């Protein structure tokens, strides 16, 4: 054994303790429930992929943000920075014969070599989905309603869904009379939300006055004005229909704001795009982003309409915490079992085993304890009830179950003790998959 | 966009489709339930760590099996090959002031650059636990009973727990009169279960006859004979006590076999060691391995008794499949909702949204369909019930819910429809964390 080491978690990564994991699993379960209620099914892809998958989707520029490495066979691999590319690889290699629409969701860790800051980590978790093979406006509305219902189900109070349409954005830019190169540069500045750089890039005052409205437009009336004469009336009207559908799907219209400046960066996005913010989080306020896209070119496959989004799970938790949401405490054991004498230890083991098999969460004291000390331990672990087993209990087969919040005591046989938990199991408390 | 690519999953990694993920999540939930019933709480550590953490624990030899890489800051990192080192790092950096015993479990993916074969992947999942700060024999018995109950809960029929004690193994080797170097080489051969190499390394026939019994001994009587005169009577008797406790804890004695040849490879293991096999799996039959250890030296910290094991989750699934276990099918939606006319689409959206919020899993048809086609789609997605919404339904507010297995139809208002699911939620079916 070498000299002692003191190792920390790598920069930008985290350990999660029991309390934090409990909270994360609670929110995860709430989100899974929503995905299931919309008919989405979970899939999982590898943690690393061939580097080419990510560069083909996002361009060589992404390499700077990747954890890329060669394996011992010389293959170029990278830890996934996002999941959509992998889902579409999975789709094109294995799922394309499945009946459409395919509704797939994932909950996976992703990795970016990024400067760590509040709500931004080098290893972070994304929950997201892809709706594949459903180009219908109703499918769009459903997916966006699903996004909103996710943050709703997690209990977030302050959020805004921003909704844009790339046909409108492109048409407005095209109508500006700028060169193709100039428009491309503008798209880049818009995507970075660099309003200052954007206005500086527009030498013509009339262009500036018109195009800056991309950032100011928030409602349908404004969108119609902005798009007037740009030749994208159909897109504008599809946004109007979408707004109505979202309301039917239970999305509060006060939560929805139009934002024609959403660019989503990459060329294969088209049509509807959306982002969801938690305004309280400041610079890192964006919790979710998505839109319609078609990655079939990347894989040399026939076109398939796809629509997806990814929710930053860590950031959602930061947003919930910033709102002071009442986060669930990890529950203590149902019963704390302690032997009062060495001779009673076997009886304590048996009681613990039977209660566990009946469905109870049991903390067993691993050495014999005096009653006072045993009760102290039961409180320390926040047990709901305490079961002390001494020679009398062992011999009589009558056990005393003490409720630690009321102090109430009941004398029960082992069978009666088991029955305390069995009915709970029957009512639906037994092992249950996180998916619905 | 570059030329089209055809990317596969990297060698030794897998995509999991909806059906397989559903099965994995079911088994995962069963196992989590068992950990919770024993009072274990979940933690999570980063996917990669500083390389030094793994070499300090397992020696430089492990580098050959690691996905090791430098980050852009020049730090040596590695994808975790196992979780125990990380848990102990977490313990020593952040958890050592917590009340003892600490009962921690994890469900995490690990990575080994290994030749892929049946049940052996380069990315694989481990579910395991560490019991920290409880050196008691009862704690040992509990941990081993927990290991057995995990595979039991998953429904595995054929398995054997093998139980050894390193004090016995070391004493028997010490008594052989071999040199220290010779004994070290023997330990290595034992750990590889290389019985042939092992007997070849023993020139003395008397040594051979005695030491080969390490591999043959299966019960307490045999263990006593093997250890006779080797000066490890205390360890042998602790095994006898442990066997009794396991039985009290509900472990079927027919499942337990002694195996003094279990070596667990590494120096910081001591005392009780155990492995659990699914004999049907042949060469890759070991599902689980664990024992008592003390990693404090690695971190230059005061000694802390620890006991843990890791279960190969993928291999458990292979074992279940090899037994032809009835694996759960992913359920279809509770209700398939379809609009029969474009004009009824808004009503269909509203019905779907309200049913979902009441707790139902709803598949909404995203375009208007004729009744026959809608019912076909409902069967195709394996929905339990179908809700067709036409102009009559929209106008009257009376909806017809059809049970697709019985053909029975009921006419209900939207409120009555919601009530079909609300009671189920009240009985315990709502979002629930995977941990108990």
Image: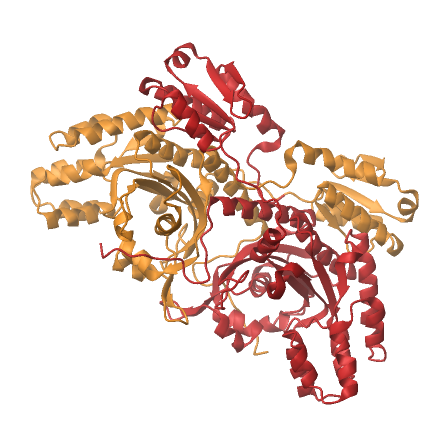
Chain colours: A red, B orange
Residue B13 or A64: which is nearer the viewer?
A64
Where does the image place residue A334, in percent across and percent down from the top left?
51, 29
Where does the image place residue A98, in percent across and percent down from the top left?
64, 56
What residue lies at 23% left-to-right and 57% top-to-bottom?
A3
Residue B136 found in image quarter = top left
Image check: A204 left or right of A98? right
B117 is higher (above) or lower (below) than A182? above
Task: Count numbered badges in the picture.
Answer: 0
Q: Is residue A314 visible?
A: yes
What residue lies at 22% left-to-right and 57% top-to-bottom?
A2
B165 is higher (above) or lower (below) than A276? above
| Rendered-image quadrant of the N terminus of chain B | bottom right
Q: Is residue A130 visible?
A: no
Residue A180 found in image quarter = bottom right
Residue B352 or A1: which is nearer the viewer?
A1
Image check: A279 left or right of B277? right
Residue A391 or A134: which is nearer the viewer?
A391
Where does the image place residue A142, in percent across and percent down from the top left?
74, 56
A259 is higher (above) or lower (below) than A415? below
Where does the image place residue B241, in percent across and percent down from the top left?
28, 25
Residue extending furthest toward the top = A396
What residue lies at 68% left-to-right and 36% top-to-bottom?
B425
Image check: B139 left or right of A184? left
């Amino acid at each position: 054994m070498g000299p002692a080491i003191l190792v920390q978690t790598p920069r930008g990564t985290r350990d999660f303790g029991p309390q934090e994991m409990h909270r994360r699993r609670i929110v995860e379960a709430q989100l899974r429930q929503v995905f299931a209620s919309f008919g989405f099914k979970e899939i999982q892809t590898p943690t690393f992929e061939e580097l080419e998958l990510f560069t083909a989707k996002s361009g060589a520029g992404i390499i700077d943000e990747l954890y890329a490495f060669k394996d011992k066979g010389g293959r170029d691999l990278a830890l996934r920075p996002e999941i959509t590319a992998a889902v579409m690889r999975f789709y094109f290699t294995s799922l394309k014969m499945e009946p459409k629409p395919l509704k797939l969701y994932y909950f996976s860790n992703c990795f970016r070599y990024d400067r760590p800051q509040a709500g931004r980590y080098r290893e972070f978790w994304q929950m997201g989905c892809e709706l594949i093979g459903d180009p219908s406006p109703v499918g769009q509305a459903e997916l966006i309603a699903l996004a909103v219902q996710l943050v709703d189900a997690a209990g977030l109070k302050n959020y805004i869904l921003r909704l844009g349409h790339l046909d409108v954005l492109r048409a407005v830019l095209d109508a500006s009379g700028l060169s193709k190169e100039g428009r491309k540069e503008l798209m880049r500045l818009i995507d970075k939300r660099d309003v200052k750089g954007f206005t500086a890039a527009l030498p013509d005052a009339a262009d500036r006055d018109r195009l800056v409205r991309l950032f100011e437009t928030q409602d349908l009336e404004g969108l119609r004005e902005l798009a007037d004469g740009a030749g994208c009336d159909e897109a504008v009207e599809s946004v109007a229909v979408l707004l109505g559908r979202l309301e039917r799907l239970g999305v509060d219209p006060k939560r929805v704001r139009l934002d024609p400046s959403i660019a989503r960066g990459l060329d294969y996005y088209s049509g509807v795009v959306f982002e969801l913010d938690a305004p309280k989080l400041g610079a890192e306020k964006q919790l979710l982003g998505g839109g319609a896209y078609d990655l079939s070119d990347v894989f040399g496959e026939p076109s398939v309409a796809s629509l997806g989004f990814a929710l930053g799970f860590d950031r959602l938790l930061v947003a919930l915490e910033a709102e002071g949401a009442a986060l669930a405490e990890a529950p203590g054991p149902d019963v704390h079992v302690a032997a009062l004498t060495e001779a009673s230890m076997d009886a304590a083991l048996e009681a613990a085993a039977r209660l566990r098999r009946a469905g109870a969460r049991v903390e067993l004291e691993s050495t014999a304890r005096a009653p006072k000390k045993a009760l102290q331990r039961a409180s320390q672990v926040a047990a709901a009830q305490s079961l002390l087993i001494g020679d009398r209990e062992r011999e009589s087969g009558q056990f005393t179950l003490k409720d630690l919040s009321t102090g109430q005591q009941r004398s029960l046989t082992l069978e009666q003790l088991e029955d305390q938990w069995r009915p709970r199991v029957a009512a639906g408390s037994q092992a249950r998959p996180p998916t619905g």
